Image (cartoon, coloured by chain):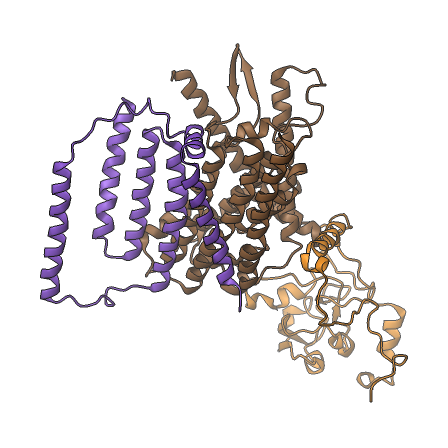
Chain colours: A purple, B orange, C brown
Amino acid sequence: MFSIYLFIFLSVVALFSALKVLLSKKPIHSVLYMTLTFFTLAGHYILLNAQFLAVVHVIVYAGAIMVLFLFTMMLLNLNLEGEFSKSTLMKIVAVIAGGLLFLVLIASLKSFDVATVGTPELTQIGLVKNLGNILYKDYLLPFELSSILFLSAMVGAVMLGKKD
Amino acid sequence: MIPNSKNKIVLTKRSKVVSNKTMTWIERLYLPAIFQGMAITLSHFFKKEVTIQYPEVQRPVSDIYRGLHVLKRDDQGRERCTACGLCALSCPAEAITMIAAERKEDEMHLYREEKYASLYEINMLRCIFCGNCETACPKEAIFLTERFVPSQTKRDKFIYGKDVLVEPKDAPIDISKRQTPEVLAFKKDKTQSHNK
Amino acid sequence: MDIQFVLYKLALAGIILLVSLVIAMYATLAERKVAGFFQDRLGPNRAGTFGLLQPVADGVKLFMKEEFMPATADKFLYLLGPCLTMLVALLSSAVIPWGKSINIGGVDYSLQVADINIGVLYVFAVVSIGVYGVMIGGWASNNKYALMGAVRAASQMISYELAMSMSIVTIVMTTGSLSLNEIVAQQPGIHWNVWTQPIGFLVFTICVFAECNRAPFDLPECETELIGGYHTEYSSMKLGFYLFSEYINMFIASAMISSLYFGGYNFPFINDLGLSQNVLTLLGTGIFFCKIGVFIFLFMWIRWTLPRFRYDQLMRFGWKTLLPLAIANVILTGFFHLLFKN
């Protein structure tokens, strides 16, 4: 019962902040609202009993990626005057393109049969132990491959930082 | 000419020759150096503090310490200063200002001489506490004492008038501590220019 | 979820909040005292005996100061910055096991607010969002120095987070659990993790120093270069929040170091004393706070010993020394784990 209210609250905040990402005048505000959206999504994950996913979501998206976004935005110093000009033709093209995307989304949603997921409390898949078991038993090879990819990216970053 | 190592002036025993030699592996770890530094700071942690808790504890000062001035009264409680201006003249920092006034009939008990200083100011920010005013004074009116000039938050508070400088009638300020035989001899020394 | 349980958790959270605030308060005094002693001075000793009322005096002073906001500042974000910093600083105390459980009337009351099975990850998450308060405050001030401080804080925290996470990974590998309670419980007596993980301990401690913005990693707020860094434009209690959260961070970080590497509430001969459970728990909590005190002292000791890094040195140290060291430690630990645990 309590979780229903929580769900409604989180959803309202998520939708509000997602809208604010688009509607904010200042880019920094957009980035911060996006961070807020990520936090509400993490809250949804917790409601779905997926604690690991929630925390990793916060660490990776809110803690690292959005910080880098914020970092770049601060250094770019985007002003309202600095915006590139939008001619009428550009606006028409943008409306058509956006409308088409919207249409595609609507169409795909309409054809999609919303499957009823079992009660979220019963799924224990999101807990660390179960997730670890699945990752290290059923999906060992893809997991290891992506780990190596990440490690090589990390080593690459260190190498790029070295002179000559 | 390259100075001979024997003739080299040694300023400190702890001087080290700086070199650009490449550091060894241990040195590049920096950890031994860090621990060394931490040991040094920790040794200071247990050393005796040098702080003196000022108003309660005062640093001992010399007998002839020159501090805040006092304008003395004579044994009948009259101001000794006659506003001759010698102190202001002798003052190398030009810190002393005074205005002379004539003593009235009914002021006989206030001032010893016929002329007195109606205004006597010492700017403590200018004063260098050299004591020349004391040496110059022919009436033995101004003396330096071992008292301190307290700190203030406003500059004009440092201009001390007669209200601060003249000693209170009921609480005479002891100046004998500074008047050591050496000081007295110095004041009477005719070879010094100020005594001629 | 009965009402008694909720009340007990609320009370525990309140007590921990209060304790962290009081400890942070007195850490400010301790910092000044320790600095004094290191420099052969006395430190503050006028407000109360031994200066014990100094934190109160500081607080009153900060409250009395003029509330100033730059005209060009982003009003909301300017206010949000210090609040966020304070909030995040207090958040991670929820998962630290402050002691074993206390038995009252046959019911065990654990001295940990939330024993979640992802405690370590939760701490990572909180640490990783800790930079927002600094960044928002620095940007919203609309001041070059503040912005420089914020940018430095962001890049420094992101850089050192990596090495810190990698050093905790080894702890998770040897313990086999992400729960802090479990990690502490697996270090009974003197079997502390620091004996098996000296490199991890070193890397973790250095990274924690960087995450707390403490000297020698205090580049985001270094006075000599950036005036005050991200809090240049802050005054009154908003500045107080920033300064205060640094000490809370220090307290939490010390608690993390002692529970991850120094056995938390465990101490040698714990079972030979023959004391009852409640007494043992309280004793353990006392020991834990002693360990925390030692590390807070270490924080101060380092601050008053080492000079500040240069910015490029800081970055090179984080990426080229600590990170490879931490990764090597992970590989080594895995190797030994495979070799000896089977």
Depth order, front residue of A86/C221: A86
Residue B41 in sight in this render = yes
The percent position of residue C106, horizontal first and vertical second, equals 53, 10
The percent position of residue C47, horizontal first and vertical second, equals 61, 44
The percent position of residue B116, horizontal first and vertical second, equals 66, 75
Question: In the picture shown, does residue C127 fall above or below C191?
Answer: below
Q: Is residue C340 left or right of residue B5?
A: left
| Residue appearing at x 65%, y 69% in the figure | B107
Question: In the picture shown, does residue B93 fall above or below C21?
Answer: below
Instruction: Give the position of the N terminus of chain C as an image quadrant.
Output: top left
In the figure, residue C265 lies in which quadrant?
top right
Depth order, front residue of B132/A130: A130
Question: In the picture shown, does residue B193 fall above or below A77?
Answer: below
Q: Is residue C160 left or right of residue B184?
A: left
Residue C47 in sight in this render = no
Q: Count up the numbered dots.
A: 0
Question: In the picture shown, does residue C220 fall above or below C104?
Answer: below
Q: Residue furthest bottom?
A: B1
The percent position of residue B119, horizontal first and vertical second, equals 61, 73
| Residue appearing at x 32%, y 53% in the figure | C75
In the figure, residue C54 lies in which quadrant?
top right
Q: Is residue C199 left or right of residue C245?
A: right
